[in-house]
Structure formats: structure tokens, C-alpha cells
């Protein structure tokens, strides 16, 4: 899903931002929040992470129409200290409190070295890299993870126990692209091989993902409070508000000279680039470089929108009364 589609039309990012903002406003979101949602989703498309960009738009809009997600949340900071905070999303989209939390931790880390925040009582927050990347702007390391409320089923294999939690690390560089790990803690079937078949070939990988997913679920879920038992908390006010997140930032300069650190990251990147590429690839790069290259190029020539992606956007247009972006 996150490969460049074989058949596509390019769409100017600003046109897609405008459409996405209008769609959220039609669903009841205020202009400020709609603008931020559009920015975050289209920037995700711009990196080629299509699975968590505007392909999600129809689902998000439908959740608001069905009154499962609050289109106009009043986000509150429940607990706040010098370096920590707890954000309540008021049943809305997870992007909104998570973005605020990311801004908070970066500012606090610049003041105190390290900061962390959790968010809760909200819906999906999208790709974790949306929030870890904010730390890069202030020469900090960023981390973000999220989890949703679920109970493992006794009828399912432990191979599915990771919960598919999103996880992202973002590390600044100098002249080279930043290193950004933006992934889900999930190893599903490939389409040709089932989970059970994959396990026969790479059992260690499954165990690593189970552990990684459990850690993400504890930090982005349990620590965030997705299972709060406080009697005064109504966790069912908005049916879709079953998710939480943990976001933190680290100021590198508190530990060593920033420029020397960046130079070493650059040198490491260059060493990696001289290695033999993975099978089927023509470049050897660390995570984040491909997305960085796409952002630069596609901002100029447009985002490649595949046929099924076009259909999703046209469904949104027809559903809420906007001019379709594509004629097909």
C-alpha cells in the first residue's frame, strides 16, 4: 500500500490540502482543527505513507457522521508539569491532542533536556512519524507510539498479539536526511504466505514484534490511560475514543556537542550508502531517506494518487457534497 502505485495521477499537494480541510469542515470540524488535520494527512501522503494519509479520510469522516468521533473536541491538559503532561482528546481525532503533546514535549525538552506526554480519550492518531518528526525542527530526538483498547482473544494465535501499535523514532542529521523509523509493530501475512507459514521461516522476528508491540501497548496504551477505571470517567461517551499515545523528546545538546553528533550521523549515513542495497533496491539507505526524497520531489511535481485512492477521495466528495477531485 505504501509503494508508488503503478497507475496514478499526480495531484498538487495544496489542492489536496484544501479538499481535505473542506471535507473535515463539512463533517462539523472547526476551521483550525480541519486545517491541521489536512496538513498532517497530506504531509503523510507526501512522504509516500499512503496507508495513513488521505486514504483514511473516508473512514474518519464516516466516524464523525455516525457520531462515534467528536468533530469538535475541546482538548484539555489534565495534568501538567515542567516536563510532563496528560492531554485529554475529548473523543475527537487523535491527531489533535497528539500534535499538541508533541509541541509540548519539544518545547519542554529544550528547557529541561527530556520531556514526555501522554494523550487519551481519542480516536486514531495516524502514523507515529507525524509527531516524532516535530522534534527534528529543534534538533531533538523524537519518539512516539500509540495503542488502542482491546482484549486479546483466546481463539487467536499469540502471533497476532502485537496489537499493530505504531512506533516512530526521529533522529536529526546535518547535511544528510534525518533518520526516521516510522512503522507498525505487526508482522502479518504477505498475501502469499500466512502468519503460520512465515513463522516457520522467521520465528525470531515474530517474537521480536510481539515484544515490541507489548512495550508500545504498555506505553502508548496503559500508561496513557486507555483503560481508566475512574468512576467519573465515561469511556463510552464517544465510541471511537478508544486510543492513547505516548510522545517524548530528548535534547541532544544536553548530552554532547550537537554539531559533532550531526557530523557523526552524516558520516554513518554516507557509510551506509556505500553498502550493497537490499535485493530489489537500487540504493542503500537508512529509514527516512526515501520519505525525505519524496517530500522534496512530490512537493514540486505532485503526489501520485493511485486509482483506488482516487476512488476513496471521490466517495468522500460525493458523501459530503464537494466537487470530486478526479473524473473516473
Image (cartoon, rainbow, N blue to C red):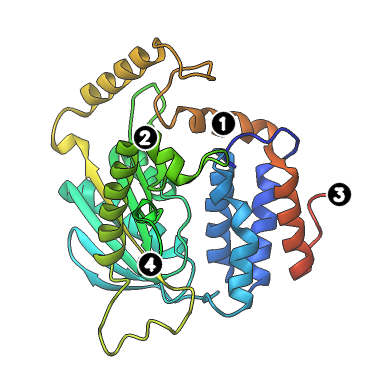
- Give the number of the disc on residue 202: 2
Disc 1 vs disc 2: Cβ atoms closer than 8 Å? Answer: no
Compared with 59, 103 (above or below) is above
Lower sequence index among marks 1 and 2: 2
**Which residue, given by chain and number where applicable, does mark 4 sit on?**
153
Closer to us: 328 or 206 = 206
Query: Residue at the spot x=86%, y=50% of the render?
Result: 327
Earlier sequence position, callout 3 versus callout 2:
2
Mark 4 vs 1: CB contact within 8 A: no
Q: Nearer the viewer, mark 3 or mark 2?
A: 2
Task: Check the image and name the residue furthest to the bottom.
Answer: 232
Which SS class for mark 3?
Answer: loop
Q: Residues within 10 Å of mark 3 (few under 14, many from 20)?
A: few
Q: Nearer the viewer, mark 3 or mark 1?
A: 3
- CA separation in Å, label 3 and label 4: 42 Å
**Which of labels 1 and 2 is toward the front?**
2
Residue 238's x, y, as percent? Answer: 47, 80
* Displayed quadrant of residue 116: bottom left
The 10 Å Cα crowd at callout 2, few under 14, some 14 to 19, many 20 or more, is: few
Label 4 CA crowd tier, 10 Å (few <14, some 14–19, many 20+)? few
Q: Is residue 86 left or right of residue 321?
A: left
Residue receiving disc 1 = 294
| Dot 1 alpha-carbon crowd within 10 angstroms: few under 14, some 14 to 19, many 20 or more | some
In the rendered image, residue 61, in percent from the top left (x then y), is placed at: 63, 68
Q: Do the residues bearing badges 4 and 2 touch, measured as CB atoms within 8 Å?
A: no
Residue placed at 22% from the left, 41% from the top?
A: 251
Residue behind mark 3: 328
Amino acid at each position: 500500500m505504501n509503494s508508488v502505485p503503478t497507475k496514478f495521477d499526480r495531484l498538487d499537494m495544496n489542492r489536496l490540502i484544501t479538499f481535505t480541510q473542506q471535507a473535515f469542515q463539512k463533517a462539523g470540524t472547526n476551521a483550525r482543527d480541519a486545517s491541521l488535520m489536512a496538513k498532517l494527512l497530506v504531509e503523510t501522503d507526501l512522504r509516500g505513507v499512503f496507508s495513513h494519509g488521505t486514504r483514511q479520510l473516508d473512514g474518519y469522516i464516516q466516524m464523525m457522521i455516525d457520531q462515534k468521533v467528536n468533530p469538535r473536541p475541546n482538548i484539555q491538559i489534565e495534568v501538567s508539569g515542567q516536563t510532563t503532561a496528560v492531554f485529554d482528546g475529548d473523543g475527537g481525532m487523535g491527531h489533535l491532542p497528539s500534535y499538541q503533546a508533541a509541541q509540548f514535549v519539544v518545547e519542554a525538552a529544550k528547557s529541561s533536556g527530556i520531556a514526555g506526554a501522554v494523550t487519551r480519550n481519542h480516536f486514531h492518531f495516524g502514523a507515529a512519524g507525524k509527531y516524532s518528526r516535530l522534534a527534528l525542527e529543534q534538533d531533538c530526538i523524537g519518539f512516539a507510539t500509540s495503542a488502542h483498547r482491546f482484549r486479546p482473544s483466546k481463539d487467536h494465535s499469540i502471533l497476532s498479539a502485537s496489537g499493530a501499535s505504531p512506533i516512530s523514532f526521529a533522529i536529526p542529521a546535518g547535511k544528510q536526511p534525518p533518520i526516521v523509523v516510522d512503522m507498525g509493530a505487526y508482522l502479518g501475512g504477505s498475501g502469499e504466505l500466512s502468519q503460520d507459514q512465515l513463522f516457520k521461516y522467521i520465528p525470531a522476528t515474530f517474537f521480536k514484534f510481539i515484544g515490541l508491540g507489548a512495550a508500545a501497548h504498555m506505553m502508548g496504551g496503559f500508561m496513557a490511560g486507555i483503560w481508566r477505571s475512574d468512576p467519573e470517567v465515561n469511556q463510552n461517551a464517544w465510541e471511537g475514543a478508544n486510543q492513547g499515545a505516548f510522545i517524548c523528546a530528548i535534547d541532544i545538546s544536553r548530552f554532547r556537542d550537537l554539531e559533532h553528533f550531526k557530523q557523526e550521523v552524516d558520516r554513518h549515513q554516507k557509510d551506509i550508502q556505500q553498502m550493497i542495497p537490499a535485493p530489489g533496491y537500487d540504493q542503500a539507505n537508512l529509514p527516512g531517506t526515501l520519505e525525505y526524497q519524496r517530500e522534496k520531489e512530490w512537493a514540486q511535481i505532485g503526489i501520485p494518487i493511485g486509482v483506488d485512492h482516487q476512488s476513496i477521495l471521490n466517495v468522500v466528495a460525493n458523501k459530503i457534497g464537494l466537487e470530486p477531485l478526479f473524473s473516473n
